[in-house]
Amino acid sequence: MFRIAIGIIPSLLFCLTFAAAQDNLSSTERVWKDSSGRFQVTAKLIEQVGKKVVLQTSSGRKIEIPSDRLSDADQTYLKNMESAPSSPAPPPPSSRSPGTDQPKPIEVSSDPAAELDSAPRLKFSNTFWNVKVSDPQLPEFEPTPVALPKPHGNRQAHAANSLLMKAAVGDISGSGPSAQTRLMIGDFRTGQLTELPAVSGTAMQPIAILGDGSTVVMIGMGKDRTTTNEDLQSWDIRDGKVQRGDIWKPYAGQSNPGIRFATAGPDNRLITCSKGGHIVAWQMPQRRALWQIEMGSPPYWHTNADLSQLAIASATQLVMVDLSEGKVTGSKSLSDLGRIYYPKLSFNPSEDKLYLSSIGRVLILDLRKNE
């Protein structure tokens, strides 16, 4: 099974999948199973390309799987579908206004401090646990690695969106007013790598790709003398061009306002965390604060593949947040496990366990049993 581990990809390669769709199929949702019977997913059939099929879940996620790895019942269903007339798949949703190439005008909040004052604060305790675990999903993509071009300057950390199967990488060259940022977008479904023109006078790196598929949230690096690691900026990517939005400080006025991490959430949301451990969910592009939670110390984090769950860990506490509903579903003290040094987090492929690594050891948490 291929997953994107957001924030944990050690090489400079994209794993991309090429799907040359020939026929568009339309069907109602049904339960698909693999030949072993262990994995299943509720989805509709979108395409059948050679010996592979493309399924789409109700959340919009597409899954590609070899047809010979499906159950006998599913393979029989596919044979019956081959004789049915095909119909074109619906076009993807667009955020553009009809008859224009420009995005719709939006009302943007210019006062993050006021937004935070009005956003509800999520609470957690040491013993609460009500984490929902979904059934195992069918294997997704068989990746084809594609090497990135030679760096123009200093290659930056990447941003990825596992639901969209897209990732962004940036290069920064020069310094001060002559600094340039080059952004590249890799599409894991089509296998395409889009190299965008250099943006002069900027020294920023991608930190998140939003759910609309065209907005990359960038963080300032300080080399252009106007931005710092406290600043975020949305870059709108359309038709091979970059349009920069306003620079904003999510944690303006706070004692430790630097950005520790940011990641995309469901429904075009952005989840940010300050270096002081203050986590906020923002509705984008309005930058409206939906909820917030304070960990008390800088945490480490990981999201699952469909961006519905966020795991957060400090040296003493693990917290699980349902990103779709904006509520804490689990909280567990780590104090009885001994000292946790620099913890890192990752869901396992079937997303029923959580791996927590510390120096010299790995802890595995069963999310169903809380053990």
Image: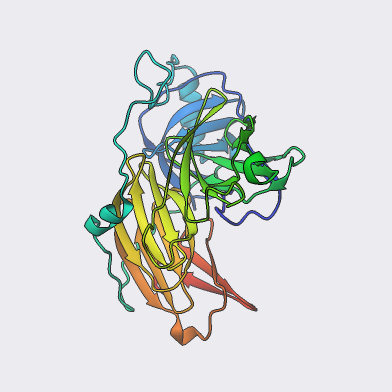
In the image, is residue 317 above or below residue 43? below
Whether residue 51 appears in this view of the structure is yes
Left or right: 156 in relation to 137: right
Residue at 31% across / 32% down in the picture?
106
Q: Residue furthest right?
A: 150
Quarter-of-image position of residue 32: top left
Task: Provide residue 73's location: percent of width, then percent of height.
Answer: 47, 37
> Which residue does the image show at 60% across and 48% down from the upper left?
158
On the image, the x and y values in percent for residue 166 come to: 55, 39
Residue 367 position (above or below residue 286): below
Q: Observer-nearest residue: 198 or 149?
A: 198
Q: Quadrant of residue 123?
A: bottom left
Write down the quadrant of residue 189 in the picture: top right
Q: Is residue 270 above or below residue 100?
A: below
Is residue 143 visible in the rendered image? The answer is: no
Q: Position of residue 217 (x, y in %)?
A: 48, 43
Image check: 147 left or right of 366? Answer: right
- Depth check: 270 or 54 in front? 270
For residue 50, above or below residue 127: above
* Residue at the spot 38% in from the left edge and 37% down from the top edge: 30
Quarter of the picture containing the C terminus is bottom left
